[in-house]
Image (spheres, rainbow, N blue to C red):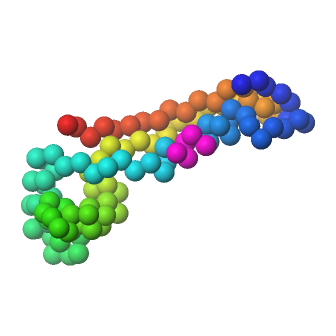
Amino acid sequence: MPGATARSPSATNAIYELADALGKVRDHEFPVKMSDTTRAFFAKAGAARGDELGTCDGGAVAEPRRQAAEAAVSKDRGYHSMLRTTCVATLLEGGHANNALPQRAVANVNCRIFPR
């Protein structure tokens, strides 16, 4: 991307393009996946809990309440990451001077892939 000085700003520059791409990463929700291990965990964890989330834990295994149960369990950050692949931006780098439009911007996106 061509650089320039800040006195001639542009609606597009490397940082804005990177920010748009990171917004797409943030907004993407990977589908729920269940392995034999997560099914067993949720079945036992659900039976051991006496609250609403406990009911959902067990419900995440059985139909027809599966979608509602998955949505409820996904609200918990720990469970959310146990149920699907997750990707999150962890490091940004861009620009070379306070008064110059950046020619490049880079982000590290850390993904934890749900095992098959």
Asked whether residue 37 is in view, the answer is: yes
Residue at left offset 49%, top offset 43%: 25
Query: How many labels sit on residues?
Result: 0
Which quarter of the image is occupied by the C terminus?
Answer: top left
Residue 50, quarter of the rendered image = bottom left
Q: Position of residue 63 (x, y in %)?
A: 15, 64
Residue furthest right in the image = 7
Residue at left offset 55%, top offset 33%: 107
Please tell me whether residue 4 is drawn above or below residue 42 in the rendered image: above
Q: Position of residue 30 (x, y in %)?
A: 36, 47
Residue furthest front in the image = 64
Q: Position of residue 23 (x, y in %)?
A: 55, 47
User: Could you tell whether 18 is left or right of 31 in the image?
Assistant: right
User: Could you tell whether 81 is left or right of 34 in the image?
Assistant: right
Residue at left offset 61%, top offset 37%: 18
Asked whether residue 81 is in view, the answer is: no
Is 97 a magenta residue?
Answer: no
Question: Between 86 and 33, which is closer to the camera in this rendering?
Answer: 33
Which quarter of the image is occupied by the N terminus?
Answer: top right
Question: Between 107 and 35, which is closer to the camera in this rendering?
Answer: 35
User: Could you tell whether 58 is left or right of 15 in the image?
Assistant: left
| Overall secondary structure of the magenta section | helix
The region drawn magenta spans 20-24
Q: Position of residue 97 (x, y in %)?
A: 78, 29
Residue furthest bottom in the image = 51
